[in-house]
Image (spheres, rainbow, N blue to C red):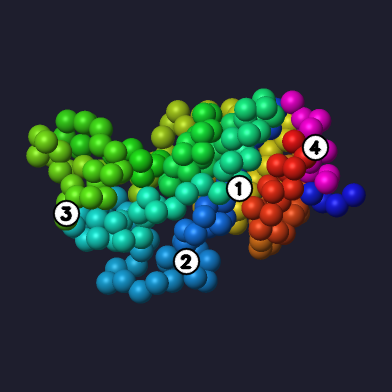
Amino acid sequence: MSDIDTLIAWIKESKNIVFFGGAGVSTESGLKDFRSKDGLYYEKYDYPPEEILSHHFFMNYTKEFYKFYRDKLNTRNFKPNITHEVLKLMEDKKLLDCVITQNIDGFHTDAGSINVYELHGSIKKNHCMKCHKFYDEEFVFNSKDIPRCSCGGIIKPDVVLYEEGLDDDTVSNSIKAISNCDLLIIGGTSLNVYPAAGFINYFRGKHLVLINKDKTSYDNMCDLVIHENIGKVFEQIKKEI
């Protein structure tokens, strides 16, 4: 029996499955990740991307922030891929309890998944910092320079920047889901981003599975490790469920 066959067998026998995903889930849609050798953090800008995507940079150099944001985080020309689609199918079939994602592209909700916890927020949600009025991604990405509300306030994306904390409800719901599931599938993440990566330490279930092209420091903790493109794995899952 192959590793993917083992995973499929576990999916069929499990009563409560949680999927925890990272950048590798979205790169197969054509997006760049951040930390790989071809990622955004290795491109050259006037400021390091880690600084541009920080709270203090947004507050002090808002115009420069939005130049980078529009150039590199606009995902409107990309679509969900096979992994997003199969996770939605698993939810429909009552096989999957929820998706926990570190990605901000909103592809899981685009694919139709309902129970999604976006640890780092979403580019699809934006609010005025003054009156809290909501604006969608189209308004922000189509704006010139700094997007502003009808009240004159600056609009900020609901994404978690460096120096900002994660949303308390999202964190507690994610930890509760991981604590209660019997199969946790981790996909497309190097598990280097904290505190999100530390959430998997709350798992107390039966099977812990990691699907990632490269090795991670968590490999030896898992019951099953598949070093493969996540899309290829989920194509096989789709055939069997």
Helix, strand or loop status at disc 1? helix
- The residue that label 3 is drawn on is 144
Closer to the eye: label 1 or 2: 1
The first of marks 1 and 4 along the sequence is 4
State the image coordinates of residue 65 (x, y, percent, origin top left). Answer: 25, 57
Which residue lies at the image location 72% right of the left edge and 59% below the top edge? 227
Q: Nearer the viewer, mark 4 or mark 3?
A: 3
Residue type at mark 1 is Ile
- Dot 3 falls on a residue whose secondary structure is loop
Give whichever of discs 3 and 2 has the lower sequence position. 2
Q: How many C-alpha atoms fall within 10 Å of the one at disc 4: few (<14), some, or many (≥20)?
A: some
Lower position in the chain sequence, tag 1 or tag 2: 2
Q: Where does label 4 land, which residue?
A: 10
- The residue that label 2 is drawn on is 39
Q: Amino acid at mark 4?
A: Trp
Q: Residue furthest left?
A: 152
> Which region of the structure is painted magenta?
5-15
Gap between marks 2 and 4 measured at Cα: 33 Å
Residue 131, image quadrant: top left
Which secondary structure lies at badge 2?
loop
* Residue 62 at least partly seen: yes
Question: Quadrant of residue 13 in the image?
Answer: top right
User: Residue 58: x and y, percent?
Assistant: 25, 52
- Cα distance, mark 3 to mark 1? 34 Å
